[in-house]
Image (cartoon, helix red, strand yellow):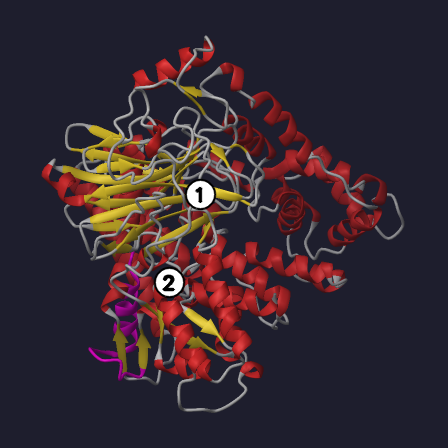
């Protein structure tokens, strides 16, 4: 299990980890087992670098088998990829009338027709049953096939060698990441912490710190863990993580509302939102042992912070704190000898004998007291940065910028970059911005009403002021770091990769990772979407839908369960029940030439849960792409080929009803990888303007290439065109987003 887990970590970084103890010889000639391994891996769409091939040649044969098994597991070669329709690229011409006739035929128990395993009678002259692997009426599959067409991919992804040093460096980079980790990074960190010793290093992000604290407490090091808990919010974050598995502090009411909404259904008789609400409330109930209560009481009692400040920090989550105080019996412990500070804390907190900083800021803003407002904001530079744009509109740009310049050096670099990236959209009167509240779905919000007070010239000046200020601040930070190097190489691909700040992915990428906003060129004329779900689950009704939204200049279209055939798109059929343990699959073929001829602009890839609840965990979605035509099995309809997979993600948290996982730009023939949750039961519930807002947000982000150019200019480095440079930054380096964040000098 250990080696498999570490192999999965390395594969996400486009590498294969080989422990030194697995190397058993030093042969220069390729062995038979190595050649067979390379051939099998090529069928899956991968190949080895020269150094990796040589290293694999000298490892234990059992480890070679393990490498292949891990690749096959991740690519799902043992899963059931059989769709509802055989040779589904040819339409079955099923219609609504077919469904109506079958419905009435079964209601009135008609004679004749064909009775299927599910019990439904299919009248003659309705559905062409010879074309189906299951029931066309209820979507229950009966026949299953295996992968047939493997190795159709037109390119192989080159895997590199990872040794212990590379693995440990990656482990360290996750702990030191200066931005919050996404779901893939969190999963990798958990695996690393399970099998590797915890290195001694400062943990930059609070969310990451929770994982470290949890590990220490599990190992009985409560006292060591307490050293990392600097504020009451740290304690609350840890307690909430242990209760929910969420690293962000999402309010209970938000979680309950989300669970209830996900269980709503078009048909009232199938609506289970009330039951879901009750179940969610039960899951969130707090219950702690005496040992845990005493541990938290000691943490609060020994915290190196005055009580009034602690209470002010606790105030924004006052409702949650009241629940936790009761569940942890803190009032009881506060009466014990030695817990005098905790007793004082309880008294001040419950009687609210403390000032709230944010209320003072709000009060002074409403009074237009600029001096007092800015004096307060300069006490907390990070919050000043987050409210900079609105304060520029409220008090005037020049005055606000002048005050902000005094504290910009104390603002975390990730926030400085955020200001630079989002100013363009914020100061656009006509621009709607994409936001995602904690625990919610992506939303778009209208522009600030105060923008109407300013003309276009003034707003453009504000944009320029922000850009000049932030770039100058970053140059100063880069210049403050001494660098003996003279030359730098910047891979051209890095200019297409956005800096990973905000918009964290909540799905896991088991194959080589990509940053949100990364663009994938389409090699051929066809893109094939795929979705697989239900593996290891018992047979049941579990209706997940794969669909796409086609946007034209003056209209829109969709391809989904209700519209299997449309211009440029063909669906493989709507499966609504899963077979026992093996799962099932759906596909959509997208013909770019047909869409271009019809003047389509964008195609948005989506999956959503038609069943009650949210998208089922371990559901996999992605797309295939090859310069060569991708075949579909005539016998079973299986159309999955791992060698053609461009990108795929796996859902791990069942919080979203719908998920956008990519957008095809028809004219540019490239796919933008993005992740946007939405609350619709069908693709019709997708807010396409929200997608456009998110795309605008991603395109506004500073790319890694431009960031490195800033570094080169500030540190006097000469940019050269070859990797024969003192500093080399290539696409392989950029795959580790946590390592890229080390450029954000604080």
Q: Position of residue 568 (x, y in %)?
A: 19, 38
Q: In the displayed structure, does residue 604 sit left or right of residue 741?
A: left
- Which residue is pictured at 54% across the width and 80% down the height? 60
Is residue 397 visible to us here? no
Q: Position of residue 530 (x, y in %)?
A: 36, 45
Badge 2 local density, few (<14 within 10 Å), some, or many (20+)? many
Q: In the displayed structure, does residue 147 sit left or right of residue 538?
A: left
Q: In the displayed structure, does residue 228 sit left or right of residue 721?
A: right
Q: Which residues are magenta?
A: 702-726
Instruction: Name the foreground residue: 195 vs 483.
Output: 195
- The number of discs equals 2
Picture quarter with the C terminus? bottom left
Q: In the displayed structure, does residue 584 sit left or right of residue 710?
A: right
* Label 2 sits on residue: 44
Image: 53 above or below 45 = below
Is residue 308 visible to us here? yes
Q: For marks 2 and 1, give the one nearer the viewer.
A: 1
Classify mark 2: helix, strand or loop.
Answer: loop
Badge 1 local density, few (<14 within 10 Å), some, or many (20+)? some
Q: Earlier in the sequence, mark 2 or mark 1?
A: 2
- Which residue is pictured at 28% across the width and 60% down the height? 153
Residue 596, image quadrant: top left
Q: Position of residue 148 (x, y in %)?
A: 36, 54
* Label 1 sits on residue: 144
């Amino acid at each position: 299990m250990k080696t498999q887990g570490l192999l999965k970590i390395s594969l996400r970084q486009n590498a294969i980890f080989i422990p030194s103890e697995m190397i058993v010889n030093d042969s220069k000639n390729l062995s038979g087992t190595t050649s067979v391994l390379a051939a099998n891996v090529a069928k899956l769409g991968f190949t080895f670098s020269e150094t990796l091939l040589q290293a694999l040649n000298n490892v234990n044969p059992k480890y070679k088998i393990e490498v292949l098994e891990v690749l096959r597991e991740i690519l799902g070669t043992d899963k059931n990829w059989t769709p509802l329709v055989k040779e589904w690229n040819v339409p079955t011409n099923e219609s609504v009338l077919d469904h109506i006739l079958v419905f009435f035929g079964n209601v009135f128990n008609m004679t004749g027709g064909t009775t299927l395993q599910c019990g439904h009678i299919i009248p003659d002259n309705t559905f062409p049953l010879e074309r189906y692997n299951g029931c066309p009426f209820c979507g229950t599959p009966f026949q299953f096939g295996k992968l047939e067409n493997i190795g159709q991919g037109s390119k192989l992804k080159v895997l590199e060698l990872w040794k212990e040093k590379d693995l440990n460096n990656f482990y360290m980079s996750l702990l030191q990441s200066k931005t919050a980790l996404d779901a893939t990074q969190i999963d990798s960190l958990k695996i690393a912490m399970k099998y590797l010793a915890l290195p001694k290093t400062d943990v930059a992000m609070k969310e990451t710190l929770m994982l470290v604290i949890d590990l220490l407490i599990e190992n009985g090091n409560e006292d060591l863990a307490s050293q990392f808990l600097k504020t009451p919010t740290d304690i609350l974050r840890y307690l909430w993580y242990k209760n929910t598995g969420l690293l962000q502090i999402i309010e209970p009411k938000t979680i309950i509302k989300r669970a209830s909404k996900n269980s709503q259904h078009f048909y009232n008789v199938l609506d289970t939102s009330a039951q879901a609400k009750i179940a969610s409330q039960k899951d969130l109930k707090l219950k702690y042992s005496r040992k845990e209560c005493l541990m938290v009481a000691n943490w609060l009692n020994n915290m190196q912070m005055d009580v009034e400040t602690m209470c002010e920090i606790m105030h924004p989550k006052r409702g949650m704190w009241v629940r936790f105080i009761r569940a942890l019996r803190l009032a009881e412990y506060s009466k014990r000898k030695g817990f005098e500070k905790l007793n004082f804390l309880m008294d001040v907190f419950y009687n609210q004998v403390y000032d709230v900083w944010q209320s003072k800021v709000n009060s002074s803003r409403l009074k237009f007291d600029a001096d007092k407002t800015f004096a307060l904001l300069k006490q907390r530079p990070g919050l000043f940065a987050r409210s900079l744009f609105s304060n520029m509109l409220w008090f005037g740009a020049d005055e606000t910028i002048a005050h902000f310049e005094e504290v910009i050096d104390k603002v975390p670099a990730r926030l400085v970059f955020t200001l630079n990236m989002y100013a363009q959209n914020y100061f656009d009167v006509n621009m709607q911005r994409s936001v995602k509240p904690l625990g919610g779905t992506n939303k778009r919000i209208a522009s600030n009403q105060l923008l109407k007070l300013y003309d276009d010239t003034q707003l453009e000046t504000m944009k320029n002021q922000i850009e000049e200020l932030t770039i100058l601040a970053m140059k100063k930070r880069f210049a403050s770091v001494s660098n003996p190097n003279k030359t730098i190489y910047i891979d051209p691909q890095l200019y297409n990769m956005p800096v990973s700040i905000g918009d964290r992915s909540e799905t896991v990428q088991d194959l080589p990772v990509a940053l949100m906003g990364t663009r994938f060129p389409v090699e051929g004329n066809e893109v094939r979407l795929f979705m697989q779900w239900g593996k290891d689950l018992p047979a049941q009704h579990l209706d997940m839908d794969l669909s796409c939204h086609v946007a034209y200049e003056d209209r829109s279209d969709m391809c989904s369960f209700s519209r299997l055939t449309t211009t440029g798109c063909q669906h493989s059929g709507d499966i609504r029940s899963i077979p026992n343990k093996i799962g099932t699959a759906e596909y959509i073929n997208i013909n770019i030439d047909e869409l271009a001829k019809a003047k389509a602009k964008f195609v948005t890839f989506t999956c959503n849960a038609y069943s009650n609840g949210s998208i089922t965990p371990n559901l996999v979605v992605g797309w295939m792409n090859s310069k060569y035509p991708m075949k579909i099995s005539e016998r079973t309809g299986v159309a999955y080929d791992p060698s053609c997979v461009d990108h795929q993600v796996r859902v791990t948290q069942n919080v979203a009803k719908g998920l956008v996982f990519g957008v095809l730009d028809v004219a540019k023939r490239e796919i933008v990888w993005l992740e946007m949750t939405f609350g619709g039961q069908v693709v019709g519930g997708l807010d396409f303007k929200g997608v456009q807002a998110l795309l605008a947000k991603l395109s506004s982000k500073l790319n890694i290439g431009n960031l490195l150019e800033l570094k080169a200019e500030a540190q006097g480095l000469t940019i050269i065109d070859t990797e024969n440079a003192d500093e080399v930054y290539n696409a392989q380096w950029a795959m580790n987003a946590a390592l890229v964040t080390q450029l954000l000098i604080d």
